[in-house]
Amino acid sequence: MKIGILGGGQLARMIALAGYPLGLDFIILDPSEDAGAIGLGEHLHGQYDDQNLLAELAEKADIVTYEFENVPVKVAEFLAEHTTVFPAPNALAVAQDRLHEKGFLQQLNIPTATYASIESLTELENAMEHIEYPAILKSRRMGYDGKGQVVIKSKNQLAEAWESMQNAESIVEGFVPFQREISIIAARRPSGEVVFYPISENTHEKGILRVSECRVGDVIQSQAEDYVVRLLDALDYVGVIALELFDVDGKLIANEFAPRVHNSGHWSIEGSETSQFENHLRAILDLPLGATKARGFSGMVNFIGGLPASDNILDTENVHLHLYAKELRKGRKVAHVTVREDDRDTYFQTLEYLIDLAKLTDNS
Ligand code: AMP
C-alpha cells in the first residue's frame, strides 16, 4: 500500500516513520530538494500545482494525504478525482480561510472570539466601534505561527495596522483573555468512529508553539471532545484533526483547527499507546484506531532555529530526541524533545531542564 503525502517536512517525516511498521510505502511531493521526509519515500520534486507530478502522484498513490493546510484546494480536488484523498478537500477549504473557519465554527455552536471581516481601513474603523481593545488583525489566508497578524492596542494604531496587511483580506478579532491555550487532537475513521487524545496544554511565544504538555483527566476534556466531534461530523472528516482552543475560566473558545497531524500532539509518539501519526494512517486506511491512553506524564519542547549538543539531551533519562534533518535557520522548528515519566515530580524537573536548554539555543 502506497501513501502519497503533499509536503515533505517534519510532519510527513513522522507520518512515514509511523507507517513503516504497518508495512506502508510513501511517495512525497515537495518543491524542496532536502525537506526532512525526503529519503523516507519516493520524492516527486516540484511545485504543488505541477499537473504532470500530480498525475504521477495520483497514479502511484493508493491514498493521498497532506502535512500542511495551505495545499491549494484545486490540487486536492484534482487528486480526489483520480485517487482517494483524506482528509477530503472540503476541510482544507474551511481551514484555509479564517473568516470561513470562524463562521463554520459558530454555525456548529462552537464559541469563537468576536470577529469581523475587514477589506479596508473604513471597515476596520467601523468594526472596532463594536469590538473592545486590544484586538488582533489577521490575514484571512496563509497565516501560521503568528505570521500575517498584528495586535491593535488603541484607536490610533488602526491605520498603521491596516497598512501592515498590504490590502490582504483580513479579519479582526477581539483579544481573548485566556488563562491557558489548549488543543485537542482526535482521529476519525470513514465509519464515523472517533478517538480523542488527552488535551494538550500549549505555550506559545512570538506566535510559535514552544511547549505542549499532555494533561490527563483535565476538567475541560469533555467540553473539548464535544466541540471537536461536532467539527469532525460536520466535515465528515477522515484522519487526524487538531482543534486549538482558549480556556477562559473553564469555558472553551475556539481559535482555529488544523486538518492534519499537529505539533501539539508530538508527545503522543512516546506519551500515548498509539501516536497521532499512526492513528492518522490507521484512520485514512480505515483500520481500527489505536488506543490513545496516556503513558504516565509527557510533554514536548520545540527547538527553534538552534540545537544543543545531542549528548545533553540523550544522557537525560526518559527523554527522546527527534531531529528533523533540517538546516538551522532563524525561526525554523528544527527538532523537538519529549519527556515521558511515571513520576510527576521528575517529569516537571526534566521538562524545566529541557525548556532551559531550548531557551539557551533559541534563535526565533
Ligand atoms: P493563530 O495564528 O491564530 O494560531 O495565533 C497565534 C497565537 O496568537 C495563538 O496561539 C495565541 O497565543 C495568540 N492569539 C491569536 N488569536 C488570539 C485572540 N483572539 N486572543 C488572544 N490571543 C490570540
Image (tube, grey):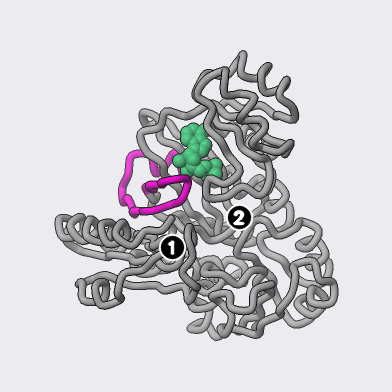
The image position of residue 358, as x and y in percent, is: 32, 60
Q: Nearer the viewer, mark 2 or mark 1?
A: 1
What residue is at 45 percent from the left and 34 percent from the top?
A: 252
Asked if the stretch drawn in magenta spans residue 221, the answer is: yes
Instruction: Single out the residue that lies furthest toward the top.
Output: 129
The mark found on residue 259 in the picture is 2
The mark found on residue 346 in the picture is none
Crowd band around label 1 with a 10 angstrom C-alpha radius: few (<14), some (14–19), many (20+): many
Residue type indicated by callout 1 = Gly
Specify whether 270 is left or right of 144.
Answer: left
Front position in the image: 134 or 331? 331
Above or below: residue 48 compared with residue 124: below
Residue type indicated by callout 2 = Pro
The mark found on residue 305 in the picture is 1
Labels in figure, total: 2
Give the image quarter of residue 241: bottom right
* Region rendered in magenta: 201-226
Disc 1 on helix, strand or loop? Answer: loop
Specify whether 48 is left or right of 151.
Answer: right
